[in-house]
Amino acid sequence: QLQLMESGGGLVQPGGSLRLSCAVSGRNYEFHTVAWFRQAPGKEREGVGCVSSNGAGTNYADSVEGRFTISRDNAKRRVYLQMNAVTPEDTATYYCAATEGDGTFHVACYAPDRYHYWGQGTQVTVSS
């Protein structure tokens, strides 16, 4: 059983940067794939990217490739989402999610139903 808690959201200007953090507690965290999702009002939840259990592998959605970076520090039990060159289209509630093993990382990184543990979300608003 894992518990996840996001932080770091807020208001940022277009072109700016923001770093979200996901703090994870519970057993065997280091054996879980962790992903970031986002959901804007009136839209479906969208996968942003995911990181493998050891942090060596990452996948990104086309919409954020080259702008966002996911990393994890297993010693600190944290996963990060560095957001650069943000646009108003990045406005959403951002969630981190985790699932055991690396199977989801390899075949279904962006499928919400593959993730068993979720945080409560943190709001990111991109506006001038």
Image: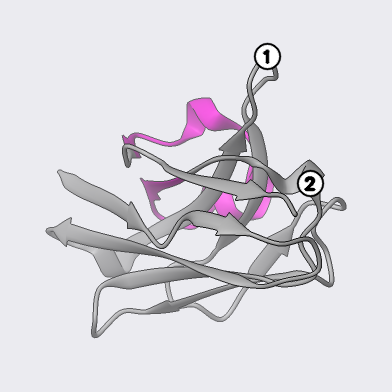
Q: Dot 1, crowdedness within 10 Å: few (<14), some or many (≥20)?
A: few
Dot in front, 1 or 2: 2
Q: Which residue is mark 2?
A: 88
Position of 108 with respect to 26 (left or right) is: right
Q: Residue at x 32, y 37 (%)?
A: 120
Query: Residue 122 placed where, x, y %?
Result: 42, 45
Q: Is residue 106 above or below residue 53?
A: above
Q: Residue at x 43, y 36 (%)?
A: 115
What are the residue bounds of the magenta stretch?
95-117
User: Considering only order in the chain, which callout, 2 or 1, is on the residue closer to the N terminus?
Assistant: 1
What residue type is disc 2 on? Pro
Q: Secondary structure at mark 2?
A: helix
Residue 69's image quarter?
bottom right
Q: Specify whether residue 94 is painted magenta.
A: no
Query: Residue 59 placed where, x, y %?
Result: 70, 62
Q: Residue at x 40, y 40 (%)?
A: 121
Residue 51's image quarter?
bottom right
Find residue 42 and name its label.
1
Q: Pick the quarter of the image with the C terminus.
A: bottom right
Q: Residue furthest front?
A: 128
Query: Residue 12 placed where, x, y %?
Result: 63, 61
